[in-house]
Amino acid sequence: MLPAVPARRVTVPEARPEVESLQAYSAPLEGRRGLLRLDFNENTVGPSPRVLKALRAIPAEQIAIYPEYDGLREAVVANLSAAGLRQPLQPDQIGLFNGVDAAIHAIFHAYGDRGDTLLTTCPTFGYYTPCAQMQGMAIEAIPYRLPDFAFPLEEIRAALQGRPRLLLICNPNNPTGTRLAPEPILELAAAAPQTLVVVDELYEAFTGDSVLPMADFSATANLVVLRSLAKTAGLAGLRIGFAIGAAPVVDRISRVTGPYDINSFAVTAAHAALADQAYTDAYVAEVRRARHWLVQQLQAAGVRHHAGGGNYLLIWPECPVAEVEGRLRAAGILVRSMASKPLIDGSLRVSIGTSEQMERFWQACREVMAAPP
């Protein structure tokens, strides 16, 4: 018998201290195909037929060469301008990113440094925290006001006196649905020119609270607005997002990204989706109808819930949230547990899809909540 060989000890080079102590942001992305996806606030029906047609028409040569972005910024400007803007936008005010997550990451790399402070709210989108931590930033997270999760405007205004490097506002907020009108956002930006005020507007289409129509980036150059084609136009799987702001700020954020971060398929799909706003508007209108219907059912059944902005709402089942989540999954429906999250522990976040999908959800939900433990 050969003598046992001692295991070789592998020495791994240490990363920066901030990375060594970092807990990566992760979400349960696997095993979701073929189920009713009411867990990640995605478009639940898919993109426009014009998007699918454009993707199918991509020639082999286009796959073999590096992506080209000519005309995409102009298409974004045209799409945003159609909704009405107080001040016109120029193409150099549009930053292109591999999803809004990548835009958020780039903002922290460009503007966040060790010892700086991120000011934000709580609870909110979970990716802000690791982005701040990897830069060695301090985090000041101000809770929403109970019982209706109102925006803590006075507390944020007071905290800006400490000159934080970044203020991140998710509007409407994920997961509480809290809405903030454009005027207070512009007032906060004007009052704190030393702070980069970032407004994450991924869900604004569902309630219409965008700051963009009123924004003047020449007057508030410290304002940045984030938009995506994931939640409304159905391009979550292709990853494309936009940062909109003063051209010098967008330039600095873009400097910390790669030259070809967005692939050719995403570029082609974005062009087609932006050109078919009617399809997106129709989907948004359907989600709003379905949301209104579901809220009526929850009220009639006496189920505790909170419905603010966005394409989602919160439900507090009487039985354990993990049990309800598991039983709904067994019924082919995915929802997202908010267990351990501040202020909303014990709730489920339910994304809103079509009326037919929400009828299916509500039937299953009633059966699950009525079942014995």
Image (cartoon, rainbow, N blue to C red):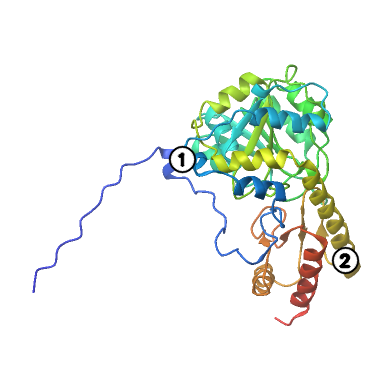
Q: Say which residue label 1 marks.
A: 64
Q: Residue at x 71, y 51 (%)?
A: 49
Q: 219 or 160, which is in the foreground? A: 219
Q: Quadrant of residue 287?
A: bottom right
- Residue that appears at 73% across and 47% down: 232
The percent position of residue 335, horizontal first and vertical second, equals 68, 63
Relative to the observer, which residue lies in front, 110 or 20?
Answer: 110
Give the position of the N terminus as an image quadrant.
bottom left
Q: Position of residue 261 (x, y in %)?
A: 52, 36
**Circle 2 residue:** 297
Identify the residue at the far bottom of this view.
372
Q: Residue at x 75, y 29 (%)?
A: 78
Q: Residue 122 appears in which quarter of the rendering? A: top right
288 and 339: which is toward the camera: 288
Q: Is 29 drawn above or below residue 233 in the view shown?
A: below
Q: How far is disc 2 from disc 1 in space, using C-alphas? A: 52 Å
Q: Amino acid at mark 2?
A: Gln
Q: Quadrant of the C terminus?
A: bottom right
